[in-house]
Image (cartoon, helix red, strand yellow):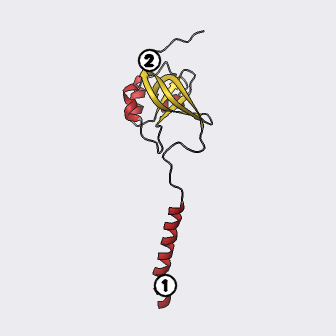
Amino acid sequence: MIRRLRNRPLKIGLLACCGILLAASQSPQTTDMAGARANISNETIEGLLRDVACPIQNLDNHATSMGSKCVRDCVKGGSPLVILTKDDRLYFPISAKMPDTDQRQALMPFVGKYVRASGIVFERTGTHAIAIKELKEVTVKDDEG
């Protein structure tokens, strides 16, 4: 019994070393956008910068109509921000860096406003994101037709 207890620290040490070696052998996280990617393109989109909750849950919310109190309350509560376009697509603002960095503070002055955003658009199985390079408030254009 004493012999078994004497070998226990050795076994624990060997397990710890194996764990460290395993962790060190893993590829480090890349800090660029290299590798397999979603569909990407440089685009300019226009839409309403707002919370994601209302247009997901209420199909009466569109890019040209919203309840401003609802938007403010949801954003204040921490709801993620999106750009809702006239064709009802939602674009999630992301950074152009990996790991991703928070875009919320830069977007807050535009919440509840119709904006034009230019940048790299990513699409993966129906989900859209945009790494915004330029953002400005614009006047809502009437639909032609």
Q: Residue at x 44, y 15 (%)?
A: 139
Residue occupied by mark 1? 7
Q: Quadrant of residue 138?
A: top left
Mark 1: which secondary structure?
A: helix
At x 48% / y 67%, what residue is drawn?
Answer: 20
Relative depth, front residue between 137 and 120: 120
Disc nearer the start of the sequence (2/1)? 1
Split into 4 quadrants, where in the image is the C terminus? top right
Is 139 located above or below residue 105 in the figure?
Answer: above
Marks 2 and 1 sit apart, C-alpha to C-alpha, by: 72 Å
Q: Which structural element holds mark 2? A: loop
Residue furthest top as drawn: 145
Q: Is residue 81 visible?
A: yes
Residue 129 in percent (x, y) is at: 53, 34
Kind of residue at disc 1: Asn
Q: Mark 2 points at which residue?
A: 138
Q: Can residue 1 be seen in this view?
A: no
User: Dot 2: few (<14), some (14–19), or many (≥20) neighbours within 10 Å?
Assistant: some
